[in-house]
Image: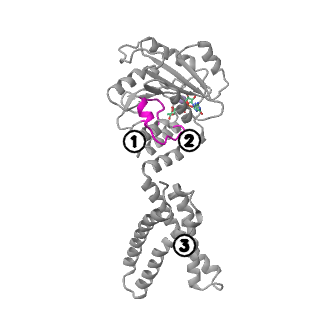
Amino acid sequence: MIDDLPKTSPRNEDRPAVSIVVPTFREADSLPPLLDRIAEIRQAGMDLEVIIVDDDSNDGTEACIADRNCPWVTLITRKDARGLSSAVLCGLEAARGETLVVMDADLSHPPEAIPDFQRALDAGADFVVGSRYVSGGTTEDGWGVLRWVNSKVATLMARPFTKVRDPMSGYLGFRRHTWSDAVDLDPVGYKIGLELIVKCRCTHVKEVPIHFSTRRHGESKLSLRVQAQYFVHILRLARWKFPGWSSFVPFALVGVTGVGVYVGLLWLFELMLQNVLSEDMRIILAILLTMMWNFIFDRWLAFWYARRDSLLRQLVGFIAVCSIPVVINFFVTRWLIGDQFVTPAAGMLGALAGSVAGVVFNWFVVRAFVFKRAS
Ligand code: GDD
Ligand code: MN
């Protein structure tokens, strides 16, 4: 029984108050019970429409919707595009309501929570999440250990971006303007909720507790490939939200591998080229190759945004910038060792401090002069 519905604007044929976007892939068996339950909410007085975005399932979805002949249900069949997040964005484009809701078709998400979503938005939330992990929220038994661990790890990885307890949820509600103000929406993978919370810069996220049911019909589309996409998604979000750290941390890590490469090369050259090259030449060769190593990985991982610029110009600039600390390092090390100026421990510490300073210096200079951000 649904009573005491929140007030929605008066019924208007063009613009319903609430649009429910439902992405589907092979959900023909779930749609009738889902639409029956939504119809009850509608009968109770909530002015809503449903937009189903189906990726050409060919399982009777089209016939099922045509048979029902509901004016408030729209089916969009995408023939060429695939993917959950892009299907959701496609549905949002077509939605006309002032309040936008996104939910799964498989009855995991109880549509009866939609009035609570509306109430939360009316009370000032800028984003609502149907949540399993707040008080009152539950998950139907039968989740294997693996799925549970999976969900927990994924949730933990989203921590730097939002404090929401259930950022993996696919049951979402927000106002039209929240979504239309979003910048750089990137429909990678499954976690469109996380993407929206971050890119819409939501600050008042309200979690409405739900009981997450196990699907009765059809099967999950959460493949291994989709799970791997989550890492790509997290990486892209990090680069968007924390561009400085997302560049510096890989730069420093590449620097650490560079030390290993350098030492390894010196050792290798001593073994193999002792009679061919002088010691100085071997050192210079090792330095040059290590610079190449750092250049390739820095360009790929730390300065991903500048990969379209001229490679040759960047390489020359990179070597020029990095030569300064390399030369300084070379002479300081010689001086320290030559005069027995410091104890080994202090020398190590000095080298370490020098390396850290070098990495920070290099990063700032390389970023400013070699790998420039397109304006
Ligand atoms: N159009 C379209 N295209 N729809 C898709 C696609 C696709 O490529 N892949 C999945 N869907 C639809 C499904 O038909 C279903 O309605 C909904 O998206 C969720 O897919 P499921 O396959 O049921 O996902 P799940 O149950 O494993 O994951 C759900 O719960 C997770 C939390 O445990 C989703 O809500 C996830 O977003 C959520 O993180
Ligand atoms: Mn599901």
Counting every numbered tag in the picture gives 3
Query: Which residue is the site of mark 2?
Result: 227
Q: Residue at x 38, y 28 (%)?
A: 208
Where residue 150 appears, as percent x and y from the top left, is 51, 40
Query: Which residue is the site of mark 3?
Result: 262
Q: Secondary structure at mark 1?
A: loop
Q: Residue at x 47, y 46 (%)?
A: 237
Which quadrant of the figure shows ligand 2? top right
Distance from disc 3 to disc 2, alpha carbons, whole Å, reads: 36 Å
Instruction: Mark 3 vs mark 1: give the one in front.
Output: 1
Q: Is residue 115 above or below residue 279?
A: above
Residue type, numbered disc 3: Tyr
Q: Which residue reaches farthest left?
A: 123
Q: Residue at x 60, y 17 (%)?
A: 65
Q: Which residue reaches farthest right?
A: 58
Residue type, numbered disc 2: Gln
Distance from disc 3 to disc 1, alpha carbons, whole Å, reads: 40 Å
Where residue 246 appears, as percent x and y from the top left, is 46, 54
Q: Secondary structure at mark 3?
A: helix
Magenta residues, as a range?
Answer: 166-190
Query: Which residue is the site of mark 1?
Result: 162
Is the C-beta separation of discs 3 and 1 under 8 Å?
no
